[in-house]
Amino acid sequence: MPQVVVDVVLKPEISDPQGQAVLGALGRLGHTQVTGVRQGKHFVLDVEGTPDEAALKEIAETLLANPVIEDVELHLPEA
């Protein structure tokens, strides 16, 4: 059964307090090479048959994400 991965992250212009908290913790732990953190959501969808990219994009943008403040990236299985 094909799996489609949907990654959702806040748009760059939207403040990410959780990402900033992680970045601060990394600095306190001595990991100063990390200069930015954006947190997000990761979904794995099991799909019957051939994945319909348009339908999956609609699902992602209407149910899994808020397209006003979040970007969606679909990762379809290799053919």
Image (cartoon, helix red, strand yellow):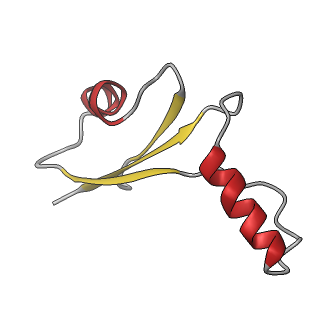
Q: In the rendered image of this protein, does residue 23 appear above or below residue 64?
A: below
Which residue is depicted at the point 19% across and 44% down? 50
Residue at the far right in the pictured view: 32
Which residue is depicted at the point 37% across and 48% down? 76
Q: In the rendered image of this protein, does residue 18 appear above or below residue 31?
A: above
The image quadrant where one finds the N terminus is: bottom left
Q: In the rendered image of this protein, does residue 67 appear above or below residue 71?
A: above
Q: Is residue 62 left or right of residue 20?
A: left
The percent position of residue 27, horizontal first and vertical second, equals 83, 70
Residue 2 vs residue 21, the one in the foreground: 21
Residue at the far top in the pictured view: 68
Q: Is residue 53 left or right of residue 23?
A: left
Residue 10 vs residue 23, the one in the foreground: 23
| Image-quadrant location for residue 33 | bottom right
The percent position of residue 31, horizontal first and vertical second, equals 83, 76
Which residue is depicted at the point 74% across and 61% down? 23
Q: How many numbered dots are placed on residues in this image? A: 0
The percent position of residue 12, horizontal first and vertical second, equals 69, 33
The percent position of residue 49, horizontal first and vertical second, equals 12, 47
Which residue is depicted at the point 30% across and 24% down? 62
Residue at the far left in the pictured view: 48
